[in-house]
Amino acid sequence: MSLFSISKLHTHLRSLRFLKKRNSDRTLEEVQQLATPKIYARMQTTLLPHAEIQGTLAHALKNRRSHRFFADIPVPLTTLAEILGSSLHREQFWHRPYPSGGGRFPLEMYLIIERVESVQPGIYHYRPDTHALEFLWKLPSHLTMASITHDTWTQSAPVLCIFTAVWERTLKDYDDFAFELALIEAGHAGQNILLCATSAGIHASPCAAFKDEILTEILDLDPIREQCVYTIALGIPPQN
């Protein structure tokens, strides 16, 4: 295990130890309330169009690749909506298209958008219950996609999807295993995005080498309660 991954692991485990003490006296009802998605009530909200991904699962599995090259072309909003909706959204909130330990759904989805049709660049939060994007704020001018990750290839990505884990949602039921469960869930949800992107003709690549401190700051996260666990870059394939 590299020093980089050991540092991440120690950060997560310190958070779990602190939260275990804070959650020991919470009732089951209070814990269940934590499982509802975050809502940025005062922020501008864009309801996304409902559209289904075309193509078969067999085709997506056969053609799935990690593509790290993107055209300088905006992603159509309908295409982004298809990917997010098919991967993460269900009209009945507790029935998601991916499994979650105890139905606690600790994951949240943020997006850094540089080039999406009809969407101003900035940082967004995705609401899986209403299939909507909440605009939070603009990306600080001194930051770029590449400066947020340790991989320079992300610089050309029009969209960076960011999974965070809210540890408290799973901690009371699963103790230290909440850490592993959140990572497993991120894998399930992330694979949904990768396969749906493939079906939609979009290049996508996972990126685990992100800079925790920068993402925590620009997403305005409580670093004890919620931490970034996974990112995926999306974009239009280069034109031949």
Image: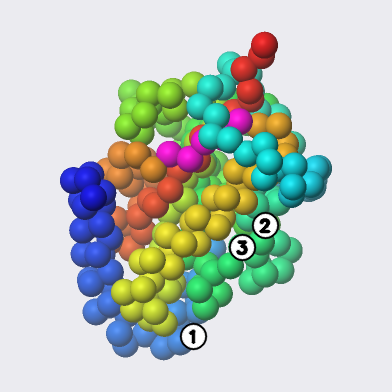
Question: Furthest residue to the front?
Answer: 62
Between 228 and 198, the one lying in front of the other is: 198
State which region is magenta: 203-207
The answer to whether residue 205 is magenta is: yes
Which numbered disc flags the more N-terminal residue, 1 or 3? 1
Query: Which residue is tagged 2?
Result: 89
Say which quadrant the C terminus sits in: top right
Between 144 and 150, the one lying in front of the other is: 150
Between 86 and 24, the one lying in front of the other is: 86
Q: Residue at x 38, y 24 (%)?
A: 152
Q: Residues within 10 Å of mark 3 (few under 14, many from 20)?
A: some
Q: What's the distance in space between the residues labelled 1 and 3, CA to CA?
A: 23 Å
Q: What's the distance in space between the residues labelled 3 and 2, CA to CA?
A: 10 Å
Magenta span dominant secondary structure: strand
Disc 3 marks a residue whose amino acid type is Tyr
Query: Which residue is tagged 3?
Result: 98
Q: Residue at x 35, y 39 (%)?
A: 209
Query: Which residue is tagged 1?
Result: 29
Q: Residue at x 50, y 27 (%)?
A: 68
Q: Is residue 142 left or right of residue 39?
A: left
